Image: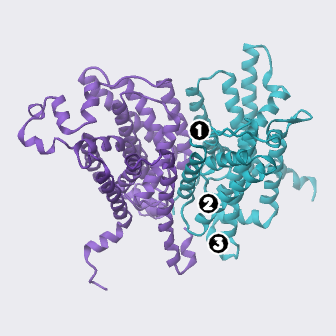
């Protein structure tokens, strides 16, 4: 075997979690589209992308604290908080809308930064910190929106939750989206494009910085990272801040999608718990140090495509939680079977 | 031993006792604030009446039983997120079966779920966070399928109602149940091999294993006890509200974890006293009650709740910095 293992195979082995998440998603999604009467059509893609976007963002948010070896129980609450904030701010003139959206993202970033400060300087465990700050975020959300309601700019809402063609038509770009060269891509969902942009503009560059690498190093061995002179504190602050940003993007999109704000506590909790499940399905280790936000993206898509399949096959939605739970348990238990291969039982303890 | 050698000992505060003392002091402060408020607005001292305090303890008993089990799991360095639907499932199955077998059924449901959690964590080495999360989803699915998603029509038995809602000599029975659970857990943690093994595993599992302790068995037993106590809480809660309902356990998971941690138990395991958990439960219940007496809107309540947890832990829950 020495020297003969091809490069791509090594890479595949290193990313086995991500690869199986993609495969699982592809399989489910293929089945869904084949069973759907309008399968493989832009309308279906648009609808699916819109429904998946918020959870994908929250799952990506959860990834960063998990990579550090912690957990963020406040991601769903931050998303809800920004959702309520957006229902106040994202209206009016284009300039007001722009500043409103910026303020929403900034609010999420500030909240994440506060989480990071408590973890770094207060030296309290992330899971407990975020359990408490999650309550604070829900409190702020309830303060902003005691009752569901509010309003989001209708043009924006329409433009961002449909295909690129509708986006161009709303904002009079490319001859109202009628330009010949534009037609092949007019059916692509805007949410999908936004997702790619978030990954390419935020996640990929972040991962390649020293801070990004340090996040992984801290998750693997914090002591070693510190002794190597890596910026451990900055990495933790950056990870939590970025988690806040991702959660805020999710909340902002949810507000744009539903045209309202809703301080829904059960919804916030279910987003948080689903984000943990998505992170694990995406191949990120809960012990920290390995995995990626892209994996979580597919983890979240798996969770969403399961519910799409429920709709299309007319299975009573009552069974959904059961099936989701079983798939999650099966996935983690399959991963757990590696213990059978371990020869020295001391390697089990970490 | 002379009195002189004993004296400094009596006044030195052990590291494990500091959270308990501070949390207890905070409870007194809470009572004072609440009493000040009622004195100013109604001219009464409702909060200091025995009836009010007993009522708070009765409400606290449900959270207390859940937190007792949660503490065992946290002490071994794990966490149980499945208590929400374990509790609800136990309550629903108990009311479904009814009759004399209602309570044993509820406890058995809890025990079974706990054992499954324990097997997954001890043998498959799946992180407890995600395994219990999956089990929670499965239990929720099973219960929703069982009830059709509606509130179950079945009612709690008389014995369940008696245990949860009745009073003996003016003292609610639920407090006796909580007291019984507390005494057993405190003795088990302090005086039995099982209890000491729990602390050992929480401190360093590999060392406990090398020392010849039955780490797997203890982990499974701790999860089983946690599940069974969640089941007991479900039975009690169903008795208190005379029936089981959807999502009845959702409001107990995070407060139970918070109560355990406020009581000074390390969230990573290995350290903490049971008395602290009791104090933590009382603190959380009282905080909620005082805020609702002050007619604080839900938004303010949530914010104050979060701020209190963070501030308490900033005072005594800080970790060492990892530098090597």
**Left of B124 or right of it: where is B209?**
right
Residue B138 seen from this side: yes
Please give the name of the residue rendered at 67% of the width and 52% of the height, measured from the top-left corner: B70
Give the label on residue A323, or none: none
B302, above or below B280, in the image: above
- Say which quarter of the image contains residue B188: bottom right
The residue where tag 2 is placed is B117
Q: Colour of chain B?
A: cyan
Q: Residue at x 31, y 73 (%)?
A: A10
**Front position in the image: A340 or B105:** B105
Percent position (x, y) of residue A275? 45, 49
Residue B40, above or below B113: above
Horizontally, residue B39 falls left or right of residue A114, namely: right
Depth check: give the residue in front, A315 or B9: A315
Residue name at image x 54 percent, y 64 percent: B126
Asked if residue B226 can be seen in this view, the reply is no
Q: Label 3 to label 2, Cα distance in Å?
A: 23 Å
Q: Chain of mark 2?
A: B
Identify the image quadrant of the N terminus of chain B.
Answer: bottom right
Task: Tell me if B217 is positioned left or right of A109 in this view.
Answer: right
């Amino acid at each position: 075997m020495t020297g003969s293992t091809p490069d791509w195979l090594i890479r595949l082995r290193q990313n086995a979690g991500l690869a199986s998440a993609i495969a699982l998603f592809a399989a489910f999604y293929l089945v869904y589209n084949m069973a759907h009467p309008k399968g493989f059509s832009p309308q279906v893609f648009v609808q699916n992308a819109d429904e998946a976007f918020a959870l994908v963002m929250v799952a990506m948010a959860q990834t960063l604290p998990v990579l550090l070896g912690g957990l963020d129980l406040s991601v769903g609450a931050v998303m809800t908080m920004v959702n309520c904030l957006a229902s106040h701010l994202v209206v009016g003139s284009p300039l007001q809308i722009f500043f409103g959206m910026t303020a929403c993202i900034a609010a999420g970033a500030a909240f994440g930064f506060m989480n990071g400060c408590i973890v770094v300087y207060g030296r309290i465990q992330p899971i407990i910190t975020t359990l408490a700050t999650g309550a604070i975020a829900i409190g702020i959300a309830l303060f902003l929106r005691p009752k569901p309601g509010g309003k989001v700019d209708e043009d924006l809402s329409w433009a961002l939750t449909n295909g690129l063609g509708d986006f161009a038509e709303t904002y009079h770009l490319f001859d109202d989206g009628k330009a010949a060269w534009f037609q092949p891509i007019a059916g692509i969902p805007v949410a999908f494009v936004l997702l790619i942009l978030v990954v390419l503009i935020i996640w990929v560059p972040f991962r390649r910085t020293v801070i990004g690498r340090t996040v992984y190093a801290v998750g693997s061995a914090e002591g070693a990272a510190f002794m190597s002179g890596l910026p451990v504190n900055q990495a933790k602050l950056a990870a939590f801040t970025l988690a806040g940003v991702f959660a805020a993007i999710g909340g902002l999109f949810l507000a744009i999608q539903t045209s309202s704000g809703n301080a829904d506590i059960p919804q916030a909790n279910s987003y948080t718990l689903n984000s943990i499940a998505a992170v694990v399905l995406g191949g990120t280790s809960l012990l920290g140090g390995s995995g990626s936000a892209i994996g979580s993206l597919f983890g979240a898509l798996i969770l969403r495509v399961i519910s799409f399949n429920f709709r299309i096959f007319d299975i009573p939605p009552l069974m959904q939680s059961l099936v989701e739970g079983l798939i999650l348990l099966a996935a983690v238990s399959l991963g757990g079977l590696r213990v059978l291969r371990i020869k020295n039982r001391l390697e089990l303890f970490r | 031993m002379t009195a002189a050698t004993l004296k400094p000992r009596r006044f030195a505060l052990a590291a494990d006792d500091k959270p308990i003392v501070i949390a207890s002091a905070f409870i007194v402060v809470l009572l004072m604030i609440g009493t000040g408020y009622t004195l100013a607005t109604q001219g009464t001292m409702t909060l200091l009446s025995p009836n009010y305090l007993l009522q708070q303890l009765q409400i606290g008993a449900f959270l207390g039983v859940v937190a007792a089990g949660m503490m065992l799991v946290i002490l071994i360095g794990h966490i149980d997120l499945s208590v929400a639907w374990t509790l609800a499932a136990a309550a629903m199955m108990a009311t479904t079966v009814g009759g004399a077998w209602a309570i044993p059924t509820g406890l058995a449901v809890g025990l079974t779920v706990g054992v499954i959690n324990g097997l997954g964590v001890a043998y498959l080495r799946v992180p407890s966070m995600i395994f219990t999360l999956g089990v929670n989803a499965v239990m929720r699915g099973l219960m929703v399928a069982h009830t059709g998603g509606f509130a179950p029509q079945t009612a709690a038995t008389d014995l369940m109602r008696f245990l949860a809602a009745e009073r003996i000599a003016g003292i609610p029975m639920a407090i006796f149940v909580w007291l019984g659970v507390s005494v057993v857990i405190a003795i088990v943690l302090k005086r039995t091999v099982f209890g000491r093994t729990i602390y050992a595993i929480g401190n360093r599992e590999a060392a406990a294993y090398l020392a010849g302790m039955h780490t797997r068995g203890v982990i499974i037993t701790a999860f089983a006890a946690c599940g069974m106590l969640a089941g007991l809480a479900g039975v009690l809660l169903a008795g208190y509200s005379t029936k089981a309902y959807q999502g009845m356990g959702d409001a107990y998971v995070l407060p139970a974890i918070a109560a355990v941690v406020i009581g000074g138990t390390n969230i990573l395991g290995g350290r903490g006293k049971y008395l602290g958990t009791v104090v933590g439960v009382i603190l959380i219940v009282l905080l909620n009650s005082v805020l609702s007496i002050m007619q604080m809107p839900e938004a303010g309540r949530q914010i104050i709740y979060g701020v209190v947890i963070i501030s308490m832990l900033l005072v005594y829950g800080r970790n060492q910095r990892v530098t090597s």
